[in-house]
Image (cartoon, rainbow, N blue to C red):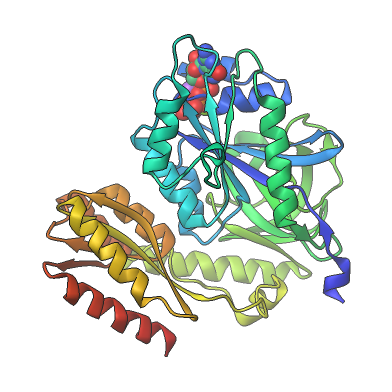
Amino acid sequence: DEEADLVTRAPIVTFLGHVDHGKTSLLDALIGINVVKGEAGGITQHIRAYTVEKDGRAVTFVDTPGHEAFTEMRARGANVTDIAVLVVAADDGIMPQTEEAISHAKAAGVPIVVALNKSDLEGVDPMRAMTQMTEHQLTPSEWGGDTEVVRTSATTGMGLDELLETLLTVADLHEYRANPSRKALGVCLEAEQQGDRGVIAKLVVQNGTLRVGDILVCGSSHGRVRAMTDTLTNAPLQEAGPSTPVNLTGLDIPPGAGDRFHVLSDITQAREIAASREHGSRTESLSGVTTKVSFETFQELLEQGRLGEQQEKTKLNVIIRSDVRGSLEAIDKELTKLENPEVEVRVLQRSVGGVTLADVTLASASDAVILAFNVIPDDAARSLADERGVEIRRYDVIYKLTDEIRLMIEGRLR
Ligand code: GTP
Ligand code: NA
Ligand code: MG
């Protein structure tokens, strides 16, 4: 039976944070390479993903060019990350993109470990950044909270062992497991057409084992795996197990970031599924609706093992915007009262001010409703919300807001 085949898999750890706070440098230092030096303008433009052995344990690290990639993947229903490392430069503290990263990690429901980076710099005050964290509901464990904060320096190597240890401890708590004997499934991180070599796709296997010669469908592309290489060493691979990122050739067209893949036994069927999706997505973009609609058949879901999973508590994700802090708190309190054993109201983000593009992106990736209390969305936010089918509900009386949320909860339960 399936349960008996489960083995522990490497945790997939993604670095998130404000630009230049040291995500790439930290990853480089952790695995002993130097990618940051070769980056044009010192800006990460590609997703990098490596599996490394540390103290006999495998860990998969993902470095992102900002959180757009992370969000885009979630918008397509693909959560590849098990643990988020929030990189905060000690001299800068929490910046706008750090705030967004926090919201995205929270919305993904993954544990957050903070790397208080650049701690080698003279005169930095770690207390300042930690106080800011607390204001964002991330209370450091040394202050009695449940967020692990590790002071690091990519430059001197300070705290790297501790960061790794902390990540492995979090991984032990969660026991990430997978079944290497089943057909592979996973997600495309990025892909491109490279002249004569054809399509090079960076995929991460989430479950099962992917082998050279396997037939796969990934989004609206398909093909037979021609060759695979290790993302760090470029060594050729015959197979790749759970939590392994690979560079792969053999697909007919580049899949999109966040497209899921799975292995099929029949190439004709693979072609048909890929073609039906291509057709479907064209219809979709014409009608102005984006990636939300799924083309997966029952059969595909079965193959991916996504049916029959344990039923979770119903979650209603909300983002709250309000004109003043006082009403934010009042709304929060009212929402807590609405929770019951079957429903959890998750507040992904709460802030003062009008509804922004970033709110809509987060809502779209998290299937959340935006509650706007005495504020309005700006034009850009409004048009993206229309395009993505994100609901922005406006209120000027708190009890009307809570009444509607109650109805929404009941609607979702029916
Ligand atoms: P983006 O990918 O552009 O978002 O940046 P990033 O978060 O990956 O930061 P990156 O690793 O490119 O580092 C930005 C700058 O900070 C570089 O000049 C690094 O050398 C420097 N830096 C990174 N970590 C540290 C550190 O721990 N201490 C000090 N002093 N400098 C650091
Ligand atoms: Na940078
Ligand atoms: Mg970088």
Residue at 36% x, 63% y is: 285
Q: Which residue is at the front of the view, 343 or 97?
A: 343
Of the 4 image quadrants, the one containing the N terminus is bottom right
In this view, 130 is above or below 175:
above
Q: Which residue is at the front of the view, 92 or 65?
A: 92
Residue 104 visible to an observer of this rendering? yes
Of the 4 image quadrants, the one containing the C terminus is bottom left
**Residue sitting farthest toward the bottom:** 414
Instruction: Indicate the position of residue 205 as horizontal and vertical percent values.
Output: 72, 53
Q: Quadrant of residue 364?
A: bottom left
Q: Is residue 407 left or right of residue 264?
A: left
Residue 382 visible to an observer of this rendering? no
Q: Quadrant of residue 408?
A: bottom left
Residue at 64% x, 75% y is: 301
Residue at 63% x, 51% y is: 82
Q: Is residue 355 left or right of residue 47?
A: left
Q: Quadrant of residue 66?
A: top left
In this view, 377 is above or below 263:
above
